[in-house]
């Protein structure tokens, strides 16, 4: 394998294991065995498991940001439809995994933010980045007359993202996407509709 | 110590440690040392760490149910005020701990529901129990004319509880109760107000 390929392989394998089992509950050896990579290779790319975990947050966020940008930039559709599209896209991703694993960023926030300050800071950044993108779509919607002019969109973006993360926990708990459907329905068919 | 006292002592000590560090990340020996209880005592009350964890969910829920019932039964106040009172009560509990630990039931749902079917079932029950109480208050509010008659209160109760759990994750992440204040404001000053 080329060097960058090895690094990607370790990240991809770790991403899957940690997404399903948690960071502290996944051993480094388990990741290496599963990736088919010797310990020396791991330490060539990562100082330790902590640094690997921090890289993993960037790895997850790379994927999430790509999907966010796709929905931000699809100017053919009205902004609230694109915002809903983002949530629907990820619901389908979750449904493909039988709703078992949850949001990797939400999972790590819950597990690690009380335990490790480097994780916490990086995850705060990840949250900000998603909330900013949601806020951008809400601003477009407000300009379009799709939302009441007096709404605090910073707060609304945070509220929407948190409501979604909470619904994802119940999804994982019940192994069903019903909480996500209820989230989509409540936000887009009830809540935002009456706020116009 | 009396027998029941010893059991309670193990549960209380474990509850604090697991609330702050996670279930898998807390060793049994750490709980025993912190509680000042020998290993034999632990195994007198609990078959293993798993059974202890399941008892712990009941332990947490005992506290949560007590607070829920207090707000359900305080018929002097209008139902939505009591519902808000429940969320405000727990915000203050969280603020007393500098917003560091999150909701013990939400934490365990995120951590354990993908790993252990007994935990998952018990946590589904805990979720149902809180959602039922929220639904009961929403039903009273509907009867009082505080809520639109066509709302699906089962769905709304689930949505509210999940939004709150999601806000608690960001609270833990940012060590600030601001996400909870935004939740309370968005739900009680904007969302439910326009749904009358």
Image (cartoon, coloured by chain):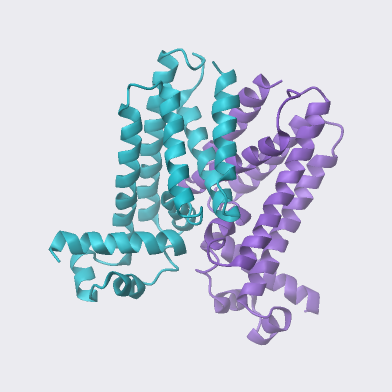
Chain colours: A cyan, B purple
Nearest the eye: A94 or B93: A94
Residue at the outermost front position: A96
Give residue A175's position: percent from left, percent from top.
57, 54
Give residue B166's position: percent from left, percent from top.
54, 43
Q: Residue at x 59, y 19 (%)?
A: A194
Q: Is residue B16 left or right of residue A97?
A: right
Q: Tell me if I can see residue A50 in this picture.
A: no
Up/down of A164 relative to B64, above or below: above
Give residue A108's position: percent from left, percent from top.
43, 55
Q: Quadrant of the rendered structure where residue A181 is?
A: top right
Q: How many marks?
A: 0
Q: Quadrant of the rendered structure where residue B45 is?
A: bottom right
Nearest the eye: A51 or B110: B110
Up/down of A49 relative to A38, above or below: above
Q: Tell me if I can see residue B113 in this picture.
A: yes
Residue at the outermost left position: A2
Up/down of A43 relative to A52, above or below: below
Q: Residue at x 63, y 55 (%)?
A: B105
Nearest the eye: A183 or B138: A183
Quadrant in which the N terminus of chain A is drawn: bottom left
Q: Residue at x 54, y 27 (%)?
A: A188
Give residue B58's position: percent from left, percent from top.
72, 62
Quadrant in which the C terminus of chain A is drawn: top right
């Amino acid at each position: 394998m080329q060097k960058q390929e090895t690094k990607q392989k370790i990240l991809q394998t770790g991403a899957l294991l940690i997404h399903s089992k948690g960071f502290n509950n996944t051993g480094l050896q388990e990741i290496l065995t599963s990736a088919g990579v010797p310990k020396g290779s791991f330490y060539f790319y990562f100082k330790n498991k902590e640094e690997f975990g921090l890289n993993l947050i960037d790895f997850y966020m790379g994927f999430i940001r790509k999907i966010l940008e796709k929905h931000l930039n699809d100017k053919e559709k009205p902004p609230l439809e694109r915002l809903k599209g983002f949530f629907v896209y990820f619901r389908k991703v979750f449904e493909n995994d039988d709703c078992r694993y949850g949001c990797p960023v939400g999972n790590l926030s819950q597990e690690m933010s009380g335990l490790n300050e480097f994780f916490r800071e990086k995850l705060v950044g990840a949250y900000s980045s998603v909330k900013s993108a949601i806020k951008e779509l809400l601003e477009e919607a407000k300009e379009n007359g799709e939302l009441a002019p007096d709404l605090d969109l910073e707060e609304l973006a945070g509220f929407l993202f948190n409501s979604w993360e909470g619904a994802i926990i119940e999804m994982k708990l019940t192994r069903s996407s019903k909480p996500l459907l209820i989230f989509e329905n409540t936000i887009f068919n009830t809540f935002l509709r009456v706020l116009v």
